[in-house]
Image (tube, rainbow, N blue to C red):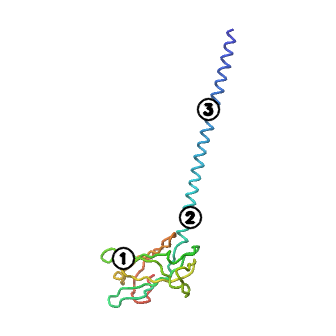
Amino acid sequence: MYEETIIKRNNDESGSIGIGAMIVFIALILVAAVASTVIIKTAEELQDRAEKTGDDTRDQISGKLIITDVYVNSDDATDGDIDDLTVIAKLASGSDPTLEGAMTYLIICDNAGFAADTGTVDALDVDATDITATTPLNSGEMFRFEIALDNCDEAAIVGNSLPMTLNVQGGGDTRVDLEIENAAVGAKLI
């Protein structure tokens, strides 16, 4: 009789050990499932961020203006400052066709306080062909536009430098410093 009790107890203990092992096994599977879900979600978020960064970088690089030349268009002979500039530019390679109204300029100057000249690019011609506001400019096409220095004309004198920033809507910025070494009509500033 003593032997029967021992055998029963061993069988009961073996069964409970098997159930415990099964519970631990199921718990491990659940933990692994949760961990894999978190890892997959994190990987998807990283991929989305990388794609967005790539798209933004592509827009910033390809959707911008390249300044070829800037010339003095008119000057004020009485005080030696520059009144108007002619800018020759083109859209960077790989840029989407862009309307002139989607391009802006900003020139900042210090006329005893902060001053700036801003405006929308009003392209005069592309390869000596007149364009309209509805004609898109294509990448690589040279065009010219004029900038009237209304607020910055007093700072546009020989020896000064004017920072100019050109922006393409949804694209990148181009910044150049206009070094004024000569204020005569036709003088090159970059």
Sequence-first disc among 1 and 3: 3
Residue occupied by mark 2: 55
Residue occupied by mark 3: 24
At x 57%, y 75%, the residue is 97
| Residue 89 locus on image (x, y percent) | 51, 80
**In-front residue for pair 33/121:** 121
Q: Amino acid at mark 3?
A: Val
Q: Which quadrant holds the N terminus?
A: top right
Q: Amino acid at mark 1?
A: Cys
Q: Are marks 1 and 3 in contact (CB under 8 Å)?
A: no
| Residue 143 locus on image (x, y percent) | 53, 83
Disc 3 element: helix
The quadrant in which residue 138 appears is bottom right
Q: CA distance from mark 2 to mark 3?
A: 47 Å
Q: How many C-alpha atoms fall within 10 Å of the one at disc 2: few (<14), some, or many (≥20)?
A: few
Q: Amino acid at mark 2?
A: Asp
Disc 1 element: strand
Is residue 60 in view? yes
In the rendered image of this protein, does residue 64 appear above or below residue 75? Answer: above
| Residue 159 locus on image (x, y percent) | 36, 82
The quadrant in which residue 185 appears is bottom left
The quadrant in which residue 127 appears is bottom right
Tell me how many marks there are: 3
Sequence-first disc among 2 and 1: 2
Residue occupied by mark 1: 109
Sequence-first disc among 2 and 3: 3
- Farthest residue toward the bottom? 77
Q: Which quadrant holds the C terminus?
A: bottom left
Q: CA distance from mark 2 to mark 1?
A: 34 Å
Q: CA distance from mark 1 to mark 3?
A: 73 Å
| Residue 57 locus on image (x, y percent) | 54, 66
In the rendered image of this protein, does residue 61 appear above or below residue 31? Answer: below
